[in-house]
Amino acid sequence: MKHTHTHSPTTISPSGTALLSAPAGGPWSVEDILADGEEQDRVPLQKLQLLGESEELRDLLLNPHLRQLLLTVDQAEDKNSLMKKYMQEPLFVEFADCCLRIVEPPEKENILPE
């Protein structure tokens, strides 16, 4: 019997956090998320957990318009072109910038190591 892999949709809880359901076959793996050649885009789990601890990000996720944008991207067949379109939306850019500041904090300038 051949096992087909299906992904469950992402839902956003009332508190504004994304809830991912594991596929029917078991827990998520990196291979479920990353395609070949995307290895350099991987964010360590510890940094991803910081997203859930961010008050700024939680506040942004309370916005129903942003939540709808995120659900639309999650369910889209052509995520790349939709992301390009949404990166023109100030609210989506604010969300993306917030996420990046959390997982890749800007380096302190003009500070010499001791």
Image (cartoon, helix red, strand yellow):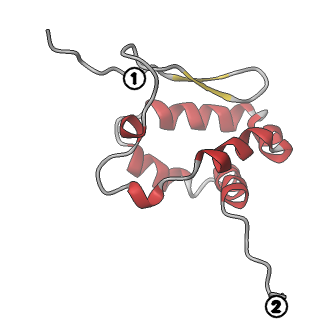
Residue 44, which numbered label? none
Whole-percent x, y for residue 54 in the image? 81, 44
Q: Quadrant of residue 37?
A: bottom left
Q: Nearer the viewer, residue 69 or 46?
A: 46
Q: What residue is disc 2 on?
A: 112
Q: Nearer the viewer, residue 73 or 37?
A: 37
Whole-percent x, y for residue 7 in the image? 39, 23
- Amino acid found under the numbered disc labelled 1: His
Looking at the rendered image, the quarter that the C terminus falls into is bottom right
Q: Nearer the viewer, residue 103 or 94?
A: 103
Whole-percent x, y for residue 81 in the image? 39, 51
Looking at the rendered image, the quarter that the N terminus falls into is top left
Image-based side of 53 in relation to 2, left or right: right
Q: Residue at x 34, y 20 (%)?
A: 6
Residue 45 lies, with reference to residue 94, above or below; the image says above
How packed mark 1 is, by other alpha carbons closer than 10 Å (few <14, some 14-19, many 20 or more), is some
Residue extending furthest left?
A: 1
- Amino acid found under the numbered disc labelled 2: Leu
Residue 81 lies, with reference to residue 40, above or below; the image says above
Whole-percent x, y for residue 108 in the image? 79, 79
SS under mark 2:
loop
Image-based side of 9 in relation to 99, left or right: left
Residue 1 lies, with reference to residue 76, above or below; the image says above
Q: Residue at x 43, y 61 (%)?
A: 40
Image-based side of 74 in relation to 99, left or right: left
SS under mark 1:
loop
Q: What residue is disc 1 on?
A: 7
Earlier along the polypeptide chain: callout 2 or callout 1?
Answer: 1
Mark 2 in CB contact with mark 1 (< 8 angstroms)? no
Determine the CA span between mark 2 and mark 1. 47 Å
Residue extending furthest top?
A: 1
Q: Residue at x 72, y 31 (%)?
A: 64
